[in-house]
Image (spheres, grey):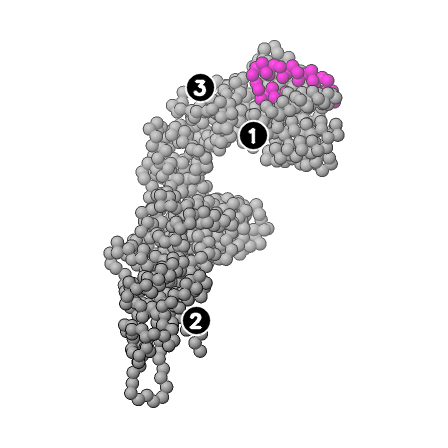
Amino acid sequence: MPTPESDAREELLSAMVGFGGSAESDAWREFDRIARAAAQADPDVARSWAAAADRTPSALRQLAFFLSEFALREPATGRALDAWARRYAPPPGGPERPAPRHANTLDGSAYVQGQSVQARDIQGGIHIHHQAAPAVPRPRQLPPVRDRLVGREGDLRVLDRLRSGRCAGARSLLVVSGFAGVGKTTLVSRWLQGHADDFPDGQLYADLGGHGTGEAESAGGPPGAAADPPAPHGGPVPTAAVLEAFLQALGVSSVPAETSQRVALWRSVTAGRRLAVMLDNAFTAAQVRPLLVGTPGSLTVVTSRNHLTGLVVDGAAVHRLTALSTESAVELLAAGGGGARVEQAPDAAREVVTLCACLPLAVCLAAAQLAIRPHRTLSALADSLSADQGPLDALQLDGDSVVRTALDTAYRTLPGDAAALYRTLGLLPTDRYDLHLLSAVRADPGGRTDAALSALVEAHLIEETGPGTYRCHDLVRAHARRRGEDEEPAARREALLDRFVDWCLGTARTAERLLTPSHRPVAGDLAAPDTVPAPLDGAAGALDWLDAHRSALMGAVRHCARTGRHTRCWMLVDALWPLFLRLRPTESWIEAHRLGLAAARSDGHREAEDRMLTSGAIGLRDAGHHEEATRWYALALENATAHGDVRQQAQALNGLGHLALRTGRLPQARDHFEQALRLRESLGYRRGAALSRIRLAETALAADDPGTAVRHLRRAHTELTQEQEHYEAARALALLGHALVRAGDHDAGTARLRAALAGFREAGARSQHWQGRSLEWLGQAAQERGDRAEAARCYTAARDLYAPVSASDTERLADRLRHL
């Protein structure tokens, strides 16, 4: 039975065919307006309207079909068509209209539209079969991925924001860049599949083969089902080949031979469509541009190991994909084959994913090894990955070391100077770099290093972590080191590392002079370095530099110890005193001084040996290694006494006193501090004397004698201020405030504590431990006077400051808050 909609469509079709031959008629002009408006909103109407330009009956019939379908969904268009039909279509029994073209006239005003059968005699039934309009292809070519994507929820949200942030009506173009194996293909495929309804005309996919490696990107799930198949080609896919495949997927049966003609046809065919096009593994912006879809409602997403900054000019938004967090990488390891073994051995699981640099591809390959060997432990896998060949060769797919292959390919595409810098990165014993460091070790005053760094950043072989600072993935650094060892001559490697150590030593000494001007360096027999130290912006800039370069500085110490550069080794440890004093990295402190002590002894330098003993004992003491610290101090005291070194004797005595104070032996502590004070005063060493007075004050407070503590601290604060030792003066002021509160003078004590806290805050985050102590003492003062709200505020702030640096202090403050 015919429906009202089909009746309306036939009536509309009759009117269209009737007026199709007269483009100048009012009816056709009105119809043209309605159809053009609908074509702006519906791609089917747009395509059929373009095809009906010659107004042939078949083209008009297809247009009528799509337009009437659209009218059923859009009431405004339906009303416009109804009004048009009432005005121009022939009403039943109405005035005679001229027979339109291609119509068979039966009598006066009757006519038959479309197919007809004319015969004299008919027997039996008549069956007329209408040929339906050809179906428009809607390709769905995206690579399959698992439903759940591990650790990428934030990246999916970023892509949503980038897409929604594009200007209305503008071409949508996104670039997802990242290191090989980081999971770009899987992320984009999963995201586009989640938005399939937004692209009713299809989703196209092409691997552009930009790097020609054939390895798979990780899928963020178990290996096999989650990884892309290897590319069948050995280099970038020609644009013409991609266009041919796309056009055929959209139903074009005859594709032109010339690339320029294919580009033009691609733009025509995609006009009015709502498509998602995924261009995977692109190498350059020029490779991508001919394939862009240029109509509103469509989206092109490009993945690449390069940044493709050239596409930003074309309106691209760029998202850089990084490695997984450790927690997500462990979850991926469990999902890919680790299973219960991950839960049973969480530490070994974290070691495995760390060796894989939390790179999804590497983690999936490690998980695959667990999946095929169900009795293998995670510890055994970690041992295998950390063996001589390392994860670069141990992680294989179908017998191929895919991570190493990917890095080899990326390395071969680098310009010559960038490749040389890449090898340099691997040879340096650090995982953090900056322009000053790299320019110094390469002896490059001309600025070529900056351009080479840009090339490495573009290739995602190094990432920029801040203004002028960079880091490498562990796997990348291992590959770069192998390239440097294989390709750089031994003499060049040695010269490069010497410049690295000299740069670290020269800049550390500059920082030492700015931060601890009273710290007397031990003289050593060393030729002047030929590197230029990094520029430092005052004391605050010096401390920031030490903090940012911890990895490089410790790498330099270890390198010197390993290669027998004894003088450089202990001199560098000595120059790092402000790093250890202010930032208190206990493990590095102890390791550096153990290496420095061995180097000083090998160098036969007695003064350097004594300095390593007394400075290193402080790190041992802070770590709770009291017996070893006592041995170091006692040995330093014995050496200094034998050689008549009064200053060093006082240093050792002060240290022994502090150990006695820590372990509750107050009379011994007081004796040691008083001896140290007398020796320092005999030398006129005011700073040292003031520090001994601070220790005597702490001993008095431990003995519940705040009055004596106040007397020592007033003088210590005055002397340190006169010596312009602002940080130590602030410590004395904070202790003075605490002692005054203990003595009952809350107002004076609180005022000094707040003044000290302001000084520590001015020094920045590097003084957060003393900020925490000052706040804790302010909280105690508030609690004593009954102000629980102020006490809670101070305790909470102190706890938050302690949290990243001291578990015991954090727990103590949490306990104070529980019992407040």
Residue that mark 2 sits on? 5
**In x, y percent, where is residue 400?**
39, 52
Give, as a three-letter code, the residue at label 2: Glu
274 left or right of 575 in image: left
Q: Which is more toward the observer, 415 or 574?
A: 415
The residue at 36%/55% (across/down) is 206
**In x, y percent, where is residue 709?**
70, 19
The residue at 32%/39% (across/down) is 415
Comes first in the chain, label 3 or label 2: 2
Residue that mark 3 sits on? 525
Q: Are marks 3 and 2 in contact (CB under 8 Å)?
A: no
Q: Which is more toward the observer, 520 or 272?
A: 272
Question: Does residue 670 lie above or below 310 as drawn?
Answer: above
Residue that mark 1 sits on? 765
Comes first in the chain, label 1 or label 2: 2
Q: Residue furthest left?
A: 258
